[in-house]
Image (tube, helix red, strand yellow):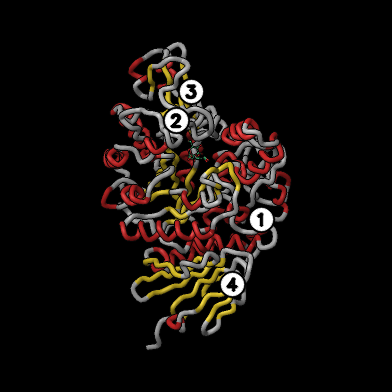
Amino acid sequence: MADFSNKVVYQVYPKSFKDSNGDGIGDLRGIIEKLDYLQELGIDYLWLTPVFLSPQNDNGYDVADYCSIDPVFGSMQEMEELIAQGEKRGIGIMLDMVFNHTSTAHEWFRKALAGEEEYQDYYIFKEGNPDQPPTNWESKFGGPAWEYVPSLHKWYLHLFDVTQADLNWENPKVRQELKKVILFWKEKGVRGFRFDVVNLISKPEVYEDDLEGDGRRFYSDGPHVHEYLKELTRDTGIDEMVTVGEMSSTSLKDCIRYSDPEEKELSMCFSFHHLKVDYKDGDKWSLMKPDRMALKKLFEDWQMGMQEGNGWNALFWCNHDQPRIVSRMGDEKQYWKESAKMLAASIHLMRGTPYIYQGEELGMTNAHYCHISQYRDVESLNYYRILLEQGKTEKEALTILAARSRDNGRTPMQWSDRINAGFTEGMPWIEAAENYRKINAEAQMQEEDSIRSFYKKLITLRKEKNVISIGTIAFFEKENPDILAFKRIYKDEEMIVLNNLTSEETTVLADPSWQGYQKILGNYECSRIENNRITLKPFETILLEKQEDEP
Ligand code: TEU
Ligand code: CA
């Protein structure tokens, strides 16, 4: 397995990145136009969320054909051009493989529905009567996880939308088909893959009611998942490419196994525990302020656990399913720039490969929509209905969506202060956040002190310093909820990273051993570093480096 410790991945959500033809929907041509922007930022890989043929019920995560491009995004020729143009700029394209389920519009599912038993075995169909689903499991998008097909007298499983039917990985034919997809894209020259909810592919042998939860404990990190991943990697020869698995409700132990190079499963894992520290009682739709102590503890457990187990983390705050981090853990009003930079440093300087989600490098914020008609996401619309059914008022439901909707991460990329943030000449499929006149790429390209410039510095530093890419990590100030502090060591290189997670000033006692350390990066021009203590300003981040001893 190859090493991706000094690489940085940039995630593009094509629908919202750049529209080239004025239909209001981002497309491949738009991405090609912006490759120079990405090269200038310094990234190594571009992870593209699905652009395959799809009814777009879940914005492409409902795939109808894994080997063709949805016309809304462009053509196969444009995809080939994107790969070639990326290559020219040192940017490898990573594609998003949605292998837990297909769209119900996929040919396999259509054949299954038409009664072909061979294809019914591609999915998880269970006999049963119409008023009794096989289990009480719930879909992650709300409602039951089973749908009844009257013509077949059978139910099928869908852990996500009703138009996303779960594939049956127990069937070797399914595994063969999916390997062919990987080989098809490998042949086209893509450099890596992200695997959607890949820890859900192995379902239990027996399907039973979950008396404690929604069913996830039966199929998350399921019985044969490690076996299937090894087989997929081995038979497609992707062990030297960058591969990242999205792990839903996973365990540290399993993530170590998925990403330990000796296991030859994946290069790294996304896990989400650190993004649930503001879920009240674990419920995404119940609001709470972020629990900073829990956040710190999770970082520590996962960083130390992965280090000890020889696993590798994908480091990230944002993606197309998450609200914007500066709105969530920072302060987008008073300390917008400071908090966005601190959040960037805290992630990029830990042990793992960092991911930047489009617009994160600009400090893009949540959408601040105030009407349900502004939302587009299937999950948001389902939950809006569910929240009203639970007795919430429209206003309460909208407050919850404003904090939690996936659409917060899907507003158009803010390129400039021109209409629609310079994203489209037409009517955007989803409204831009109003603050694009202030927060946009054009403005930040000019400014040395911008959030984007800070991200560039972090990327450059990772390339220059082994201590950042491969150094060991250890945490301190562990009992202090306000400061995320850690030390990185590689041979005789040492670094201290201090992050004030709050909008209040706070102090850290300086260790005498930091005497010869010097600040090499921060988000305030002057820092208060005294002999015995360091006073951190609101959301201040400081990177101190040990200077080489005098000869
Ligand atoms: O996401 C999986 C996932 O776990 C989230 O969608 C999560 O369930 C959701 O945010 C609940 O709050 C992946 C993709 O990233 C997502 O866009 C897809 O909708 C989903 O899989 C299904 O393919
Ligand atoms: Ca378009």
Q: Can the viewer see residue 64 in this picture?
A: no
Q: Residues within 10 Å of mark 3 (few under 14, many from 20)?
A: some
Q: Residues within 10 Å of mark 1 (few under 14, many from 20)?
A: some
Out of 334 and 74, give the one closest to the viewer.
Answer: 334
Q: Which residue is mark 4?
A: 506
Q: How many marks?
A: 4
Q: Earlier in the sequence, mark 1 or mark 4?
A: 1
Q: Earlier in the sequence, mark 1 or mark 3?
A: 3
Out of 258 and 455, give the one closest to the viewer.
Answer: 258
As helix, strand or loop, the secondary structure at mark 4 comes to strand
**Label for residue 137?**
2
Question: Do the numbered discs 3 and 4 sit on residues whose CB atoms are within 8 Å?
Answer: no
- In this rendering, the answer to whether 19 lies above or below 447 is above
Real-space CA distance between mark 4 and mark 2, rounded to the nearest whole angstrom: 46 Å
Residue 351: x and y, percent? 41, 61
Q: Earlier in the sequence, mark 2 or mark 1?
A: 2
**Label for residue 105?**
3
Out of 160 and 195, give the one closest to the viewer.
Answer: 160
Q: Which residue is mark 1?
A: 442
Real-space CA distance between mark 2 and mark 3, rounded to the nearest whole angstrom: 23 Å
**Label for residue 525?**
none
Please tell me in which quadrant of the rendered image residue 420 appears. Answer: top right
Disc 1 versus disc 3: nearer the observer: 3
> Which amino acid lies under the numbered mark 3 shown in the image of this protein?
Ala
Instruction: Name the residue: 36% across, 70% down.
Output: 490
As helix, strand or loop, the secondary structure at mark 3 comes to loop
